[in-house]
Image: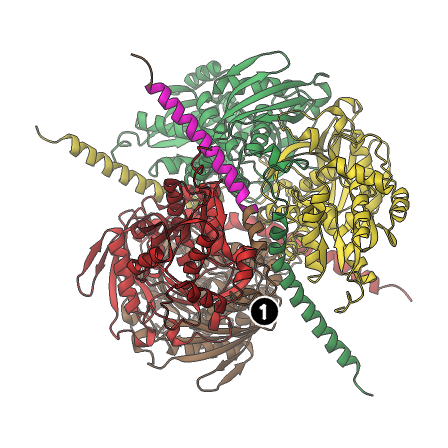
Chain colours: A red, B brown, C green, D yellow
Amino acid sequence: MDGKHKNGEKKIVLAYSGGLDTSVILVWLLEKGYEVIAYIADVGQTDDLAAAERKAFAAGASKVYVEDLKEELVTDFVFPMISANAIYEGRYLQGTAVARPLIAKRQIEIAHLEGAAWVSHGATGKGNDQVRFELAYYALDPEIQVFAPWKDPEFLADFRGRTDMINYAESKGIEITSTKAKPFSEDENLLHISHEAGILEDPNQAAPAEVYSRTVAPELAPDESVSLRIAFKDGVPIEVSNLTDGTRVSGPLPLFTYLNEVGSAHAVGRIDMVENRFVGVKSRGVYETPGGTILMAALRDLEGVAMDREVMRLRNMLADKIAQLIYNGFWFSPEMDFLMSAVNKSQELIDGHVDVKLYKGGVYPLARFSPSSLYDQELSSMDVEGGFDQTDAQGFIRIHAIRLKAHHAICKKQEEAQQKKQEQAQAVPV
Amino acid sequence: MDGKHKNGEKKIVLAYSGGLDTSVILVWLLEKGYEVIAYIADVGQTDDLAAAERKAFAAGASKVYVEDLKEELVTDFVFPMISANAIYEGRYLQGTAVARPLIAKRQIEIAHLEGAAWVSHGATGKGNDQVRFELAYYALDPEIQVFAPWKDPEFLADFRGRTDMINYAESKGIEITSTKAKPFSEDENLLHISHEAGILEDPNQAAPAEVYSRTVAPELAPDESVSLRIAFKDGVPIEVSNLTDGTRVSGPLPLFTYLNEVGSAHAVGRIDMVENRFVGVKSRGVYETPGGTILMAALRDLEGVAMDREVMRLRNMLADKIAQLIYNGFWFSPEMDFLMSAVNKSQELIDGHVDVKLYKGGVYPLARFSPSSLYDQELSSMDVEGGFDQTDAQGFIRIHAIRLKAHHAICKKQEEAQQKKQEQAQAVPV
Amino acid sequence: MDGKHKNGEKKIVLAYSGGLDTSVILVWLLEKGYEVIAYIADVGQTDDLAAAERKAFAAGASKVYVEDLKEELVTDFVFPMISANAIYEGRYLQGTAVARPLIAKRQIEIAHLEGAAWVSHGATGKGNDQVRFELAYYALDPEIQVFAPWKDPEFLADFRGRTDMINYAESKGIEITSTKAKPFSEDENLLHISHEAGILEDPNQAAPAEVYSRTVAPELAPDESVSLRIAFKDGVPIEVSNLTDGTRVSGPLPLFTYLNEVGSAHAVGRIDMVENRFVGVKSRGVYETPGGTILMAALRDLEGVAMDREVMRLRNMLADKIAQLIYNGFWFSPEMDFLMSAVNKSQELIDGHVDVKLYKGGVYPLARFSPSSLYDQELSSMDVEGGFDQTDAQGFIRIHAIRLKAHHAICKKQEEAQQKKQEQAQAVPV
Amino acid sequence: MDGKHKNGEKKIVLAYSGGLDTSVILVWLLEKGYEVIAYIADVGQTDDLAAAERKAFAAGASKVYVEDLKEELVTDFVFPMISANAIYEGRYLQGTAVARPLIAKRQIEIAHLEGAAWVSHGATGKGNDQVRFELAYYALDPEIQVFAPWKDPEFLADFRGRTDMINYAESKGIEITSTKAKPFSEDENLLHISHEAGILEDPNQAAPAEVYSRTVAPELAPDESVSLRIAFKDGVPIEVSNLTDGTRVSGPLPLFTYLNEVGSAHAVGRIDMVENRFVGVKSRGVYETPGGTILMAALRDLEGVAMDREVMRLRNMLADKIAQLIYNGFWFSPEMDFLMSAVNKSQELIDGHVDVKLYKGGVYPLARFSPSSLYDQELSSMDVEGGFDQTDAQGFIRIHAIRLKAHHAICKKQEEAQQKKQEQAQAVPV
């Protein structure tokens, strides 16, 4: 369109992790004649990014971008998702799903900066991440060329299993850091770490204790609970106070990091579930999402006092849909914009704070205060009249009963008619 | 209708608990010239029902019905509600709401048996229970007469507060058993005990430890977790095995009672929340629902492997609506029948079992097995090809991207047009 | 709050039409000691408003407000409702429902201007309008006092039927203009005229021809069709061109009035239906909504080319809910604001024009053009390849089929197991 | 069952129409070594099926099945779809979509009868029908092999346009019956005829008059209207009486055929719209659906009197989803079964009859009667009290207003706080 890819026809921006897969892909792409720009997204994973950068250069990348996306992840992706209550299938807090569009967005920006016509990622052809990456790519640049090695017949022919990759790596001098690879795969960022595949594929086998890495086991968590006060403004967390030791943290990234820290120590946010992938297969996932779990519980509790009942019902109806959009990779889509317009409206005046207790895996909201509370103690009280005329309830109930009475009358009429028929049928004279 | 109330014009069936309120109502009704039949529904509360029966006779009831509804509560109300995932506002398991229609149903049956034209209950005029009782009454017998003292001007004039009731009771020789009344109100049955009002009315005050009575506090629960295997057939629990000590329990009522017992010991099912009443006010409730919480977690986990993705989404969409219907008192309604037709369909083949660990308040599904599992380990595996052609994913993604590309193109066109306009506006010659 | 009602405790603003009912109410209120301010809302009805004003003064009103709300009705109520596709129960275009909140809003403003503590309206106690008026009153001023004569025991005791009112009117010198009252009741404004009650109450009797007053009968409409081009910007109509005679009209009110005129001449917008009132009863309504029907058809047609598929689905899901809110009187509510935030988003870029033919009651969209069209002739074409790789469809279908195959496999397994059981049962040896 | 394809590895059942495309496919498949069984589904199209059968044999089919599916189409597909109100995007009555699963079902049955491992169809790779055929195939037999020529690289290479096909046909001696092909494509069955593509691809060009073939133009329809009485039992039409000439027709197929006939004569059921295909592109369709349009209008009108309000709302919410499932090819799916369980429940007691007038394209319900009517003339009447206590409405409204008042109070508080802030900001001392 604007000639941005003119000279970039064989230039490719590869989402690079430093692991075996993307290292192999990098070298393989070079061999196919591409100029490869490695792009390392820092979304809060614990990897050694400087090492990854060195490794990318060593493998032959013409440039390496290491991009710090942590704050943007929290403010523009995690917080909005939580404000939408967009939990997938009732349990999964979308740690992986919510980071993919951000990673893709920066990747497209780099492609434009570099005049690269191509982008690439190492996600497999059976999972959700390929969809999330590629839908975001296409949504942000319809003309972008996507090279997805795990769906490419040539690449698939070259690499039929892990052994092929290791052999290839060795033959090309690619350093294989993982002294001992875990027998399952993981994805990690600020919001969560996920564990799936490998030994976790049998849903009837409990996940071994050593699978979990971010949170302590409930059994090993402190015997003393901790209480946090989480303050929100328009549905966005603005401050966390530790009511036990007096610590106060504000600012999106420090606050979220602190919640992760305390939550991890208290075993918060472990989920083991079978979920439905977008590509139609079921899959077992084990997740650890300490900070997100605390935030979700606190916001929902605050909404209890500060959100109108009918707004909450409608928002909840949309929440499931938003969760599916995020999970399926439609973060950048007109329907997401449509739904978030309403969600944002619903979060106006969700102000105040919630006190939550963390104890051996549990998150317990204990008390909540909102300057915009719709809760009216007098109105609600069973003892005080408080402006509520109890006789009003009679009309309320009787009018709601009108439909039910009419329905009953029809059913009864029907029943009687059928009974009559049966009696007449039985009364046939001999 | 069929003359059933002919001689029952001043006969009234009163839902009677043995407490101060319904005792006062009983005597007051007698004074107004009614013949009062006391009806005590045994839904699993810990009250002394024999004492209540004696007290009703002593107060002047012409008859007393003590009806054991426990098994029916579990099979016809609790299990269907759980199969619908009908949790109210994301948290409340509807312990009170689900029992009311059953109590009302038996009350109407007794009214018909006794030829009574009237029914009565002691629920207040600001709460949900009045609606649940009365909508059920009207739905089951449109011609029934309802006497709701707490909405009756004459009764309200006689009793302006608790003191009036105590004075009245004393003057009428009504025994006041509660040596020391709790400073909040409770409702109890097999599914839960609720605590609300009184000292709990300030949502910003944490509930004192002594409020809780059914479950032990997480901090006081055993240091050893317990694991249960819960087996389901068509979404209905059929057996619970304690994997720790080998106990096996089947049959709806024993099984549910056992879950309550183990859950209570392990601190399962405490909720403290602000919810929205049907009459438009917000209200703070503290609930303890041990067995129901375990069942809900287990069934949802089993659905993960055995329920089709799209069925699950649609069922979840309806679940919120069903939860509202139950909460608001529409158990007996055409819309409930409509929705449950679909829910029942969804539970076909939800067979198998789930292993859950209980530990200090937490319920952790660890493993699940279903003979009708839709989970296909090979199909799902990232390592094995297993019938999934990865190249199919390319077409899948590209076709899903078409809409997004079109949307992007329009937005970009729009943006460019606006930019052009601005440039032209700025380029106005001097 | 701000003392606005201090001196207005017996001052009342009455929504006044000039008809028998509100004239009687006016005089009755005076007799009860109120100072009555008559308020006549001009929403486009064909009544003689100057005569009504004279009549109000003659009856004793201390002030009379005649307020022209026509343009506001079109821009702030009718257009948004149409942009939400908020048709009630699939057919009713809400002519009455959409005007009530506007009338109530101005009435509250007048009450505030005049320092009146009270407002009143003449809507009956069985209909929808009482709810619409009063919910709007309370939403806009929680402290307002509402006097609703048709729910007031004293007023109801005084007036048990029409004869009582006529007698009262005669005794008080109230002029009864309706030489011959219609045997049914009507409500009229710019958007529609409704006819209900009286002779229309039997839904099995076709409405007599003379019931209809705004539109010509289809049989009497011109034999020549007329074609209109309706242009929209962001979902709002901005110009109507008559393609047959060249007339062009713009501006919300002139444009809408013109659509009414042409639509009426061509018999557009007659509906005869049984609908569900908010108060739980069913009711038969006969409506004539010429301009609104044309606009709705045109906008929906334009959305076909300019609105994203998924946005449309979500908007349609919300449309039903919005229609219910409007019908039930919740125009001024947080849930309405929530939903309209999304609707407004969906209408961005719904630009272009639609050509519709009107012919003997029918509205036929013939052609449509949008500068922001998402329709891509090449992509859609069956003949041209146009950027659509047909082989992509294979992966798309095969991945969508995965779930269906898994479901089939389970059902088959189940079937076979049951068959086996039956065979074994039948194979019991003698 | 499982070995059924043993000898059928090169046997293929081709959905055959007798037209150019499927004739070419037939011969091409033979050349590739397949044994081809031609399958002609009689769904009410006006083609000469005997000629098609002859042509199939002449082309080399080893067998030809001509299957009469008309009655099954009406009873098992059209009527259920109408009972679900499953109209796509508010207008399209799914004439093509609803027939595809039936055609596919019989095709799979024939494949099983014949031991054929393969099925094939002639639908293009950009449309909806390929999806509908193939999803039905896979849902009914997960192991079936599908040959879709228009997605097959080899076939696509051979035939790049219509000319290639004509040349091929001529070279192979395939008779080309269409003396003059229409400049657009059509699909026809009992429910409708559709016209799309070719000259209809520009949505801004009105469809020429000669496009329409099943219905007369409104302008050419009789000047006299006709009135029909349509009787339903449980939502299924059971009899049509012509109130004008006395004709009475019953039985699903005769009744539906008669509605088509009368509807066609009176210009009923023309739709011209841009819709959204499942594969993500928009498409312009012109449809004629006379009988279906009448039935839909009549059933909806009957539901007005006989269906409970809340059931109707929920059914309508599901209707959109069902419409999408049908349109997208998910007729045979667990989610369709789930939804239809509820729909079937909703149609119980939708009994009675509706009188509709047909006039120059319009369908006007005039009167309706139901023995299970929920409409209560007395209850609804504005004149009669009829069991409705108007004072009940006061409590009903006041309780509904509680939420709105609370919301207003918070908004006002907020507003005042902001105003104060602004005032303080402005009051900064000099």
Relative image position of residue A201 (x, y in whole percent)? 50, 70
Q: Main secondary structure of the magenta part?
A: helix
Neighbour tally class for label 1: few under 14, some 14-19, many 20 plus, Cα within 10 Å:
many
Judge left or right: residue D298 versus residue C282: right
Relative image position of residue A279 (x, y in whole percent)? 55, 57
Relative image position of residue D311 (x, y in whole percent)? 60, 50
Magenta residues? B399-426
| D5 vs B9, nearest the viewer | D5
| D154 vs A320, nearest the viewer | D154
Q: The C terminus of chain A lies in which quarter of the figure?
A: bottom right
Label 1 is placed on what type of residue?
Answer: Ser
Judge left or right: residue D421 versus residue D183: left
Q: Residue at x 66, y 38 (%)?
A: D92
Q: Residue at x 44, y 24 (%)?
A: C72
Q: For residue C284, say whether it is visible.
A: no
The image quadrant that residue A166 belongs to is: bottom left
| A213 vs D7, nearest the viewer | D7
Q: Chain of mark 1?
A: B
Q: Which residue is mark 1?
A: B373
Residue A398 belongs to the span the image colors magenta: no
